[in-house]
Amino acid sequence: QVQVVESGGGLVQAGGSLRLSCTLSALTSDEDFDEYVMAWFRQTPDKERERISCIGWDGQRKSPVQFYKASVKGRFTISRDSLKNTVYLQMTGLKVEDTAVYYCVADRVPVGPRTCPRDDVSRWGQGTRVTVSS
């Protein structure tokens, strides 16, 4: 089964930057990283898990499409590297309220347009902690 592994979390001061990485491994011979629609969620102890960014594909599967939650739009950038089977979340202008455990989510959608993973079939990583100090 495909494995979802996050990395890149850590402690940073407010206003600083971090880049999270999410790598898919254990893909079978008939799977391709580009078939996967990916997302980043985050969760704090006092809030529900929230989806903050996705990267999927348009109908022709030629151009990636992105989604950003309003609270991170303009500060966070999601991207994918097919050669490395990795999705990145570049976070800039970090705020104390960005402190959370960040989870990467993967959903295999081989055809058709889709921006974000489906809720009921996605695979989740173990999470990476981001702490933003004031």
Image (cartoon, rainbow, N blue to C red):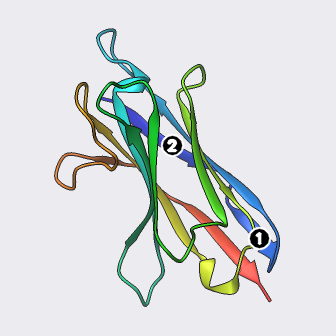
Element carrying mark 2: strand
| Side (left or right) of 79 relative to 105 | right
Q: Position of residue 128 (x, y in %)?
A: 57, 59
Q: Are the two marked residues, 1 and 2, in contact with CB atoms closer than 8 angstroms?
A: no
Q: Residue at x 39, y 72 (%)?
A: 50
Which of pointers 1 and 2 lies earlier in the amino acid sequence?
2
Kind of residue at badge 2: Val
Element carrying mark 1: strand
In this figure, what is the number of numbered marks? 2
How crowded is the residue under tag 2: few (<14 C-alpha within 10 Å), some, or many (20+)? Answer: some
Rendered image quadrant of residue 48: bottom left
Identify which residue, 8 or 115, lies in the foreground: 115
Q: Quadrant of the N terminus?
A: top left
What residue is pinned by disc 2?
5
How crowded is the residue under tag 1: few (<14 C-alpha within 10 Å), some, or many (20+)? Answer: some
Identify which residue, 12 or 64, lies in the foreground: 64
What residue is pinned by disc 1?
11
